[in-house]
Image (cartoon, helix red, strand yellow):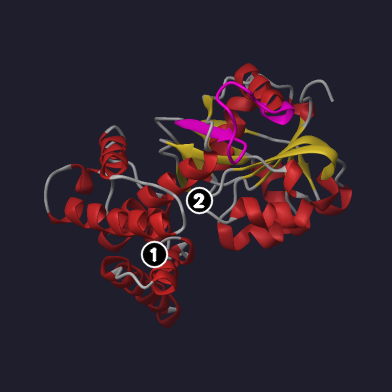
Amino acid sequence: MDKIDTIALAGLGAVGSAYLARISENVPMDRIRVVSSGERAERYRKNGVSVNGRRYFFPVTEPENGSPADLVIYAVKQHHLPQAISDSRRFVGPDTVILPLLNGIRSEADLGAAFGAKKVLYALVMGLDAVREGDNTSSACLGTIQFGEAVSEEGRWSRKVRLVKEFLDSAGVPCEVMPDMKRALWKKFMINVGVNQVTAVLRSAYGAIQRPGEARALVRSAMEEAAAAAAREGISLSAHDVGDGLSLIDRLPPGGMTSMAQDVEARRKTEVEIFGETVVELGEKHGIPVPVNAMLSRVIRAMEESYTTAR
């Protein structure tokens, strides 16, 4: 494979639709496939999806009709990844490159176990502010896809990294190759642990944590606990990294919302297990206190239980 010609996407939610809309503006539709089935597949075919007011009718392919794509992008929630892996098996061939755009620090290992670690790049999305309501996505900032091998020498990219960089550049998708993606993933995880959980508990937009006060202090404390847990796992995150995370938050639209806050507003299951509960597990493993994350994750679980009780 000299270049990436065909792509498949598993997960047409806020992240997936925002990036696929941009890709489709520069890549012919007959080179794109959305992996979907059942009622959802029919809905996408009939109604399409709207991104910033423009309607897109992406080609949809059922799992049983799949064939290998050059690049498969996963943009689902972590608890939906097992199903996405099952649905996308026919789309992954010997030369397929896999790009996971999930939150947390687990998806690369899960995809590597399913398809082979050599196919999987490490990746994350930084700065995207996409909000999904029904089949409508709005986004003022597309952010940046950061990706690469777990660790590599600066400027010495692997073949699959070069292929993905060339493709994303040609598709007009903001991207950046990182020399130490493992650390980058943990840094994003640290930021999400604070930002997602606090905004979910407060049911608030970014504006609530961009100004000085208890909400912002709570974000900082949750991030500092995650950084302490990362250090015990051999990942060095400093007070400077925490400050970087807060600076990133300040550049986001005040009215934008995190994915977890959106889940709470829509009374959906959140990703608390890959944020606060992961920090709690690491705290127990290494014998370090993580009271803020323990509190936040318990409150979010209680909120989820309230949905079930109400139904």
Q: Quadrant of the N terminus?
A: top right
Which residues fall within the magenta stretch? 143-161
Which sits in the foreground, 187 or 272? 187
| Other-residue count near label 2 (Cα within 10 Å), few / some / many at <14 / 14–19 / ≥20 | many
Q: Amino acid at mark 1?
A: Gly
In the image, is residue 192 part of the stretch drawn in magenta? no
Mark 1 Cα shell of 10 Å, populated few (<14), some (14-19), many (≥20): many
In contact (CB < 8 Å): disc 1 and disc 2: no
Q: Quadrant of the C terminus?
A: bottom left
Q: Which mark is residue 276?
A: 1
Residue 35 point in image, percent of width and height: 74, 47
Residue assigned mark 2: 103
Q: Please state the horizontal and vertical placement of residue 9, each as a whole percent of the image.
A: 69, 41
Amino acid type, residue under disc 2 in the picture: Asn
The answer to whether residue 157 is magenta is yes
Q: For the point 68% across and 35% down, which residue is it? A: 57
Give residue 165's quadrant in the image: top right
